Amino acid sequence: MTTKLPINLENLLRQRQVEGERIEYKAGWNPDAILRTLCAFANDFENLGGGYVVIGQDCDSAGMPVFPPVGLEENQLDKIQQELLGFCNLIQPPYFPLLSVERFAERNLIVLWAPGGLSRPYKVPKSVTAKTKEYRYYIRRYSSTIEAKGEDERELISLTAQVPFDDRVNQKATPGDLSQRLMEEFLREVGSELADDVTRLPVEALGRQMNVVTGPSEAPMPQNVGLLFFNEHPERFFPVTQIDVVWFPEGAGGDRFEEKIFLGPLGRITRDAINFIQRNYLKETILKHPQRAEAERFWNFPHAAIEEAVVNAIYHRSYEIREPVEIRISREDLVVLSFPGPDRSIRLEDLKKGKAVSRRYRNRRIGEFLKELDLTEGRSTGISKIIKSMAANGSPAPEFETDEERSYFLIRLPVHQKATDWAGGLPGTGSEKSSVKGSVKTPSDTAGKIVGMIRLTPTITAGELAMALGISSRAVEKQIAKLKDAGQIRREGSDKAGRWVVLEASSAQVIADAGSVKSSVKTTQETTQETTQEKIIALLRTNPATTRVALAKELGITADRVKYHLDKLRAAGKIQHHGPTKAGHWEVIDKS
């Protein structure tokens, strides 16, 4: 039985959305070469997401397709499918690509979609048609299939059962957690013929054709990438899957800030965050010079550089780390921060020159979907495009930062030197879509939201509050403790079976009402809040022997985020560590 491709056929053949090294063209049915290539795609040595084999399509010496295709005769189609099924049983462990019989330019083609396998490494006989079967491992090297030997073979074997996080099954979810509407929207956007079959296909069958559902028929499970792109609330499964856009009107060291949080499917929030920044923070300057006819035009930050920086963070961040992608904007720069840092195979010196090429990708499937949505090109071109975009705009060179542990990655885009008369700020009207939540997070505001939510649902848990507010459980517990100390709420019954009671407060203590909590879009306002670094300094003064883990628990953030702030404080000469890592102590440096 054949399936339909979840990608537009012409775009695939012409390499518009899938790079050439992930496509193999075969003019005819050559089982030995085709099975070796399928094995190589299944091994997915560089975590690119597997690839495609197109049978009936010829190519030139450079590997580019030749049109019109050669095509396959009608009487060949069934024979090829039957033989392919038998030969795929020879792959160890068994591996079967998705097969689609297609019609293009009045010719028949067979397209084999071979995603990266879940049980690598795979091996296949050097010649599946020979009587004596000699098994070999195969990998892709650029646009060629080669036998894995020596160090390559050892590295491939070391990848046993190491499936990238986005390609793993999620045992806490079911295919019913995938939105058929979101899947159809995606298929129509990329021009897939599969979109026409959505209404007649159950979600599980549709998910299998899109390779976001796997497992036996009696226990199907969605893969993480499916939940990230095709669930309205992926943060339910992957906490803090969000983008935070923060505006600092007084600079990054100031007390005031405005924040907008983007929650929802990964493709949507990526576009929404980029469009939001473009509408509210990008300003073009036009300078007229009396000595020449042409005016000088430039942007405070070039849109192309921001787009690449944001998509890079979404593509390469870890969804196992509970940290958002944070975009910090001030009048001096725009900073994109994500966790963790780039792969250790990338040298920071190469990164700064825009020549970095990752040895292996962290999220092979996320990259695949972002490419089909035209949000990224892949193949490590993002950093190079950021550098070129900044130069074309006349801006200072971008800065790239990480640490020895590669615990974070920071991209800093300095503002254009002549863009002095601009100011950002969140709009004061609730015009954003419901998928975008705007708020200024301050202690009193967060406490007010907690009180309002407790009024609506007295049995709500700290974990549910954290998920609804987009903050850590530890941060919620701290706010609850303050509210109890202030006599505004109390707990009745046990921790598991009890309920919250909101105590009556004087007019001066009323901080929220239930109606304001229900609104998903709120007017933002400027307010003051102690910065994370100021909190760290205060904690170090209180307990100089404290550790990163202890600070993380106290602040409700990850140890990696604490390390990032400690490094910043040390670089600014505000703190210093004395003695060994485990037994030393911190000193806060007071500058007169």
Image: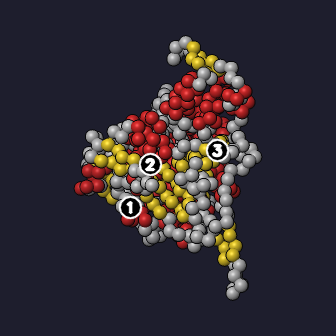
Left or right, 540 with reference to 16: left
Question: Please, which residue is most extreme toward the bottom here?
Answer: 291
Q: Tell us which disc is closer to us: 3 or 1.
A: 3
Residue ID for mark 3: 527
Q: Distance from label 2 to label 1 (Cα)? A: 20 Å
Q: Residue at x 69, y 44 (%)?
A: 524
Question: Please, which residue is most extreme toward the top here?
Answer: 493
Q: Position of residue 535 (x, y in %)?
A: 48, 42
- For the residue pair 267 and 34, the one nearer the viewer reads as 267
Q: Distance from label 3 to label 2 (Cα)? A: 22 Å
Q: Position of residue 424 (x, y in %)?
A: 66, 56
Note whether 119 is above or below 427 in the view shown: above
Q: Residues within 10 Å of mark 3 (few under 14, many from 20)?
A: few
The amino acid at mark 3 is Thr
Q: Earlier in the sequence, mark 3 or mark 2?
A: 3
Asked if one can make out residue 434 in the rendered structure from this viewpoint, the answer is: yes
Point out which mark residue 348 bears: 1
Residue ID for mark 2: 565
Q: Residue at x 58, y 48 (%)?
A: 255
Q: Tell us which disc is closer to us: 3 or 2.
A: 3
Q: Residue at x 67, y 59 (%)?
A: 423
Q: Tell us which disc is closer to us: 2 or 1.
A: 2
Asked if one can make out residue 320 in the rendered structure from this viewpoint, the answer is: no
The amino acid at mark 1 is Leu
- For the residue pair 6 and 96, the one nearer the viewer reads as 6
Q: Earlier in the sequence, mark 2 or mark 1?
A: 1
Q: Distance from label 3 to label 1 (Cα)? A: 38 Å
The amino acid at mark 2 is His
Q: Position of residue 546 (x, y in %)?
A: 36, 38
